[in-house]
Image (spheres, rainbow, N blue to C red):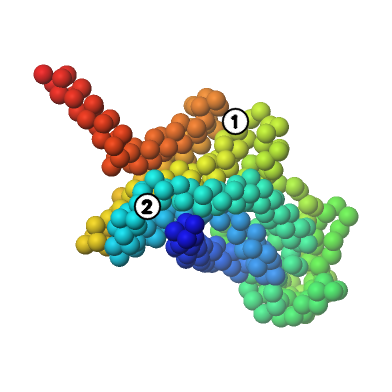
Amino acid sequence: MIILRYLTAEVFKSQFAVFIVLMSIFMSQTFVRVLADASEGKIPGYLVASIIGLRFPQLAAIILPLSVFLGVMLAYGRLYTDQEMSVLKACGISEWYVTRVTLIFATTVAILGGTVSLYLAPMAAEYEYQVRENAAADGVLSTLTAGRFQKAGTGDSVVFVHDIERNSSEMKKVFVAQASETGVESVVYAQTGLLKDLPSGRQDLELSAGHRYYFAEGDDPQRLNFSKYQILMEDQAVEQKSRNYAAQSTLQLLESDSLEANAEFQWRLAIPLTIPILAMIAVPLSSVNPRQGRFGKIMPGLAIFFAYYILLLLAKSALEDGKIPQSVGLWWIHLIGLSTAVLLLMKDRTAGGKIRKMWLTNVSKKGA
């Protein structure tokens, strides 16, 4: 029991550290992309934190298998380089015992990964759709920030507002530049502006006490003074966008007969299935010579992981296109992964030696 707790603690510490590092990297990239959308006026600034939070389960489902794989390799790699594994073996602790301890840990993480991939990640994706749709329903006002030039409304309009009263939708010192493919068509400046929601679902900007400068190709610019001027900003009727299969619940996927739904369901199942298989592969791969260091077999290990992951992605795409029968699906890749793990574990065992000897004997007979 002491050894079980020790090995589990070592693997957990490494796995958790890898998970935190990888999540930090990917969440930073997500933060930059979402922040860029907010700065361009595609989403309101107050939604940045919500959208990043909703991306967390979706990223965690992808990162968990890799963190377990690297965590096992790094933890046991350290035990090999520090000769602790040699001491354990001298005390009767076999590699198979270490594998069983690792499988207990991996199964626990797989249950967590299954909960995330089958339930939490699609729910978060659905909430993200709803958040974005509600922001779109709020119209232009939700994306405008005082003191900044921003793209807004239909077409290529650029709007600058000195001050905004969000409760009354009233703006002060409004600048609007409307452009087309040939360049800037007109520039409007008004002392005040008011966003109006029309019954048809349109959202118009009514400007007061201002000037409009019109630029026609080949003609001199024209100036128009106005007391009232109205600009169509956008149609704010809420249109529910078609959901990606990643945002549908697992129950909805099971009720659907489409190939895409089946591929998405098998992909979600692949997350918890890969975790114990990768852990079994990582145990024999972590066996390194003290002179090699704990990172001695990281590169071959990463090559195996990415080959596994890329095969899953290619098979999912082929399944969506109907090139692979649904009954075959992604199962054959897990079978290859499991076979690889068994072969690596049997390599240094007595049974593995007998199988290798039988295979070499058959090859030599065929050669003769």
Q: Residue sitting at 33 percent across and 50 percent down?
A: 285
- Numbered mark located on residue 35 in the image: none
Judged by depth in the image, the label closer to the viewer, 2 or 1, is 2
Give coordinates of residue 289: x percent, y percent: 24, 57
Determine whether 5 is above or below 96 in the image: below
Is 146 rendered above or below residue 367? below
User: Answer yes or no: do the residues labelled 2 and 1 have beta carbons within 8 Å?
Assistant: no
Amino acid marked by disc 2: Ile
Q: Secondary structure at mark 1?
A: helix
Taking depth in this image into account, of 261 and 187 the one nearest to the observer is 261
Res. 358 image quadrant:
top left
* Residue at (57% x, 37% y) in the render: 266
| CA separation in Å, label 2 and label 1 | 47 Å
Q: Which mark is residue 259?
A: 1
**Residue 311 at x, y = what percent?**
42, 39
Above or below: residue 245 compared with residue 318: below
Mark 1 neighbour density, 10 Å: few (under 14) some (14–19) many (20 or more): some
Q: Is residue 341 left or right of residue 200?
A: left
> Relative to 7, is 240 on the left or the right?
right
Residue type at numbered disc 1: Leu
The x and y percentages for residue 282 are 38, 50
Q: Residues within 10 Å of mark 2 (few under 14, many from 20)?
A: some
Specify which label sits upstream in the sequence, 2 or 1: 2
Which residue ends up furthest to the left in the rendered image? 368
In the picture, the disc for residue 93 is 2
Nearest the viewer among 206 and 20 is 20
Residue lying at 58% horizontally and 42% vertically, measured from the top left: 268
- Residue in view at x 71 percent, y 46 percent: 241
